Image (cartoon, grey):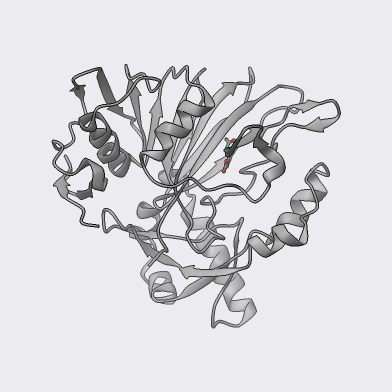
């Protein structure tokens, strides 16, 4: 499928969704479409922008979608404010960017909507309604799959009065600032990622996590990906390892691999690369898993937090 490309405000080449080819180039400030005017305001941070004045429950013009897509590539996190959308509308908006992935923990799918993962600490009738500790370790979603996630969308349905922030770390900056000796040590190498890496550790902390069935384990066989990946749409390089899912660098002795991964993990989430999202009611946050890692900061357990996540399938990393 051929992709048209347009120049972003910073000169990075931005691939456009195939169905949006021909739409005008991105404008990061006030944007008008046939149906809706909205603004995209970059944060004073190493990544991220907020989108204000757009109603995602309404149909979007190809121009609006093209501008959202370009801004997503540019800022890596888009925060759509005040979205009063249903799960079906979240699914429909997410599908503009690709196929949706269904999480291996089907126990926490939203009833009637298997594409929606419930991320929540709420317990009803003695049973957790969602994955309460999702994002406890830094990670990029579904990096343990052959085709990890392109991006994820998380919609705030119920927020705690305190805590519950989400942190995002820019992995392009992490790569670009990596000391030369470390660059040389990792360039051309591949690393193993597995969903099972810390599953038992998480189960010990959160005993409500279900034991995985043989069928679930078969769905998450270990995979390998390049330690440094190239973003398929912008061509920018990014570090692609995480403390949650990356277990070893292939071809190195265990102790060397461990030491190298520990250095990469520490570097990749330095404060200079991080944006901390403090949620507002009805925020819908759309991030790029090819450019970022993220972490859920957590909230006091007695405060309710309910979020709905959709996850878009990406390419095989190279
Ligand atoms: O709940 C959050 O803040 C983030 C959850 C998370 O890390 C995920 O869904 O992958």
State the image coordinates of residue 287 (x, y, percent, origin top left). Answer: 42, 40
Give the residue at x 28% y 42%: 74
Q: Quadrant of the N terminus?
A: bottom left
Give the residue at x 54% y 54%: 142
Q: Quadrant of the C terminus?
A: bottom left
Quadrant of the picture in which ligand 1 is shown: top right
Q: Specify the quadrant of the image occupied by residue 145.
A: bottom right
Q: Is residue 252 above or below residue 303?
A: below
Q: Is residue 15 left or right of residue 221?
A: left
State the image coordinates of residue 224 (x, y, percent, origin top left). Answer: 52, 70
Q: Is residue 105 left or right of residue 208?
A: left
Q: Is residue 168 above or below residue 234?
A: above
Q: Specify the quadrant of the image occupied by residue 188.
A: bottom left
User: In this view of the protein, can residue 164 be seen by the observer?
Assistant: no
**In front of the other: 160 or 265:** 160
State the image coordinates of residue 10 (x, y, percent, origin top left). Answer: 18, 43
State the image coordinates of residue 183 (x, y, percent, origin top left). Answer: 39, 70
Q: Is residue 307 left or right of residue 8?
A: right
Give the residue at x 85% y 25%: 125
């Amino acid at each position: 499928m051929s992709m048209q490309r347009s120049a972003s405000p910073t000169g990075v080449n931005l691939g456009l969704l195939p169905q949006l080819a021909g739409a005008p180039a991105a404008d990061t400030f006030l944007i008008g479409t046939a149906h809706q005017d909205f603004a995209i305001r970059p944060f004073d941070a190493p990544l991220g922008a907020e989108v204000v004045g757009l109603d995602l429950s309404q149909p979007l013009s190809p121009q609006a979608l093209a501008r959202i897509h370009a801004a997503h590539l540019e800022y890596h996190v888009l925060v759509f404010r005040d979205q009063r959308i249903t799960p079906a509308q979240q699914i429909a908006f997410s599908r503009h960017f690709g196929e949706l992935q269904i999480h291996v923990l089907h126990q926490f799918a939203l009833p009637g909507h298997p594409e929606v993962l419930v991320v929540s600490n709420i317990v009803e009738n003695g049973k957790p309604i969602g994955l309460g500790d999702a994002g406890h370790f830094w990670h990029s979603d579904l990096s343990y799959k052959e085709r990890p996630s392109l991006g994820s969308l998380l919609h705030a349905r119920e927020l705690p009065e305190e805590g519950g922030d989400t942190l995002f770390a820019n992995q392009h900056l992490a790569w670009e600032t990596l000391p030369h000796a470390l660059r040389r040590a990792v360039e051309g190498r591949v690393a193993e990622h597995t969903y099972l890496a810390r599953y038992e550790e998480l189960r010990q902390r959160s005993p409500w996590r279900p034991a995985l069935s043989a069928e679930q384990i078969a769905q998450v066989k270990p995979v390998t990906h390049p330690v440094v990946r190239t973003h398929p749409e912008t061509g920018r390089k990014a570090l692609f390892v995480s403390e949650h899912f990356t277990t070893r660098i292939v071809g190195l002795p265990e102790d060397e691999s461990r030491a190298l991964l520990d250095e990469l993990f520490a570097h990749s989430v330095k404060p200079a690369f991080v944006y901390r999202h403090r949620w507002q009611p009805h925020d819908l946050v759309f991030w790029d898993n090819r450019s970022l890692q993220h972490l859920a900061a957590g909230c006091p357990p007695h405060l309710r937090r309910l979020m709905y996540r959709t996850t878009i399938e990406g390419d095989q990393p190279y």
